[in-house]
Image (tube, rainbow, N blue to C red):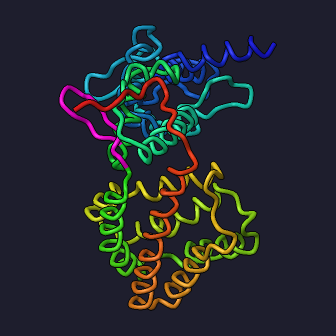
């Protein structure tokens, strides 16, 4: 029974994403949640289902071939046999999932695959430099090449992998030199972004983050790795978004390898946090300064926190190298100059 279930799961993962999207939209049309005269476009499908435009485009092309939708003379497609009257805008409710639907939601599939690959990549980056074989990567996770290319692009944006000539990929080593460079960028950008964000951070958002930190502190060290990672994201990403400085946020995106490494290492418990790790308390001090709308104090407290975090992360990765043996998966190949 278990083998049968495993085979079914493997078959489901092997189905191309565009096919799953097409199957789901087809069911929505058949069940009546997606009715006639609804305008379907690549952008609307990709936004609602949180996928790239490539599988959305292929899904729409497939449904057009089946004559379930028809291409408009201007933009996109229309559900039904012909255009009658005004078009209806696609809404999330029209393509919602029912409890009995066996469709594997693209969002969940994307997140599951990405998290697994990110963990493998970040662990290897701490140990040595390796090159990646995209086809073997797709085979290993039983998904199509287009999804793997999306995953690799996101990893590239975060600074975890690097693309070379002819789409050759390598894992960027996360050594002490790179970690110091990453923290240099974070120390330059984060305190100033937080200072810019303070006037526009909604009170309800800030108070929710403060409450979650105090709740986590009351249960520490029993707090889960996922909870700790969320605290880090709230402090070092979520609140900074209110600075509304897209240029700085793009630059900061490539300096996230330190945060990502901590997420996976702490979750694995191979190098656990000390029972008295003070990072939550430091976060609370920063957040309370933000709550007082004290820009200078918030900036200085975040600066001090990052200075301490730099050495802690470097030491954590050194311990990881001491206790974990290198065991690269089949899609990681030796680095050859």
Q: Which quarter of the figure has residue 220?
A: bottom right
**Magenta span contains residue 165:** yes
Q: Quadrant of the C terminus?
A: top left
Judge whether residue 49 can be spotted in this image. no
Residue occupying the point 47% across, 78% down: 305
Residue occupying the point 36% across, 35% down: 130
**Magenta span contains residue 291:** no
Magenta segment range? Answer: 161-173
Seen from this angle, which residue lies furthest front? 322
Check the image and report above or below for 273 versus 134.
below
Check the image and report above or below for 112 versus 204.
above
Judge whether residue 68 can be spotted in this image. yes
Rendering coords of residue 96 (x, y %): 61, 34
Q: Is residue 327 left or right of residue 172?
A: right
Q: Which quarter of the figure has residue 4?
A: top right
Rendering coords of residue 168 (x, y %): 26, 28
Seen from this angle, which residue lies furthest left? 165
Residue occupying the point 41% across, 29% down: 332
């Amino acid at each position: 029974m278990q083998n049968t279930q495993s085979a079914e799961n493997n078959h489901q993962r092997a189905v191309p994403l565009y096919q799953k999207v097409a199957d789901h939209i087809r069911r929505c049309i058949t069940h009546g949640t997606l009715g006639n005269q609804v305008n379907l476009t690549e952008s609307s499908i990709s936004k609602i289902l949180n996928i790239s435009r490539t599988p959305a485009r292929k899904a729409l092309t497939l449904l057009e071939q089946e004559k379930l939708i028809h291409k408009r003379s201007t933009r996109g497609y229309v559900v039904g046999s012909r255009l009658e009257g005004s078009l209806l805008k696609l809404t999330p409710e029209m393509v919602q999932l029912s409890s009995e639907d066996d469709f594997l939601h693209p969002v969940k599939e994307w997140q599951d695959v990405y998290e697994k690959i990110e963990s493998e990549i970040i662990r290897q980056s701490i140990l040595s430099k390796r090159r990646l074989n995209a086809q073997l990567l797709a085979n290993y996770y039983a998904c199509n090449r287009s999804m793997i290319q999306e995953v690799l692009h996101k990893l590239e944006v975060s600074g975890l992998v690097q693309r070379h000539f002819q789409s050759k990929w390598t894992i960027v080593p996360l050594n002490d030199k790179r970690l110091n460079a990453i923290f240099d960028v974070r120390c330059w950008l984060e305190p100033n972004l937080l200072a810019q964000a303070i006037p526009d951070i909604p009170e309800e958002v800030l108070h929710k983050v403060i409450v979650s930190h105090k709740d986590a502190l009351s249960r520490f060290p029993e707090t889960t790795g996922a909870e700790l990672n969320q605290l880090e994201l709230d402090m070092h990403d979520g609140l900074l978004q209110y600075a509304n400085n897209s240029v700085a946020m793009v630059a900061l995106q490539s300096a996230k390898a330190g945060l990502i490494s901590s997420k996976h290492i702490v979750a694995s418990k191979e190098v656990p946090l000390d029972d008295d790790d003070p990072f939550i308390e430091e976060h609370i001090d920063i957040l309370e300064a933000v709550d007082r709308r004290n820009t200078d104090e918030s900036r200085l407290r975040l600066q001090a926190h990052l200075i301490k975090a730099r050495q802690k992360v470097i030491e954590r990765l050194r311990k990881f190298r001491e206790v974990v043996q290198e065991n690269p998966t089949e899609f990681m190949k030796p680095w050859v100059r």
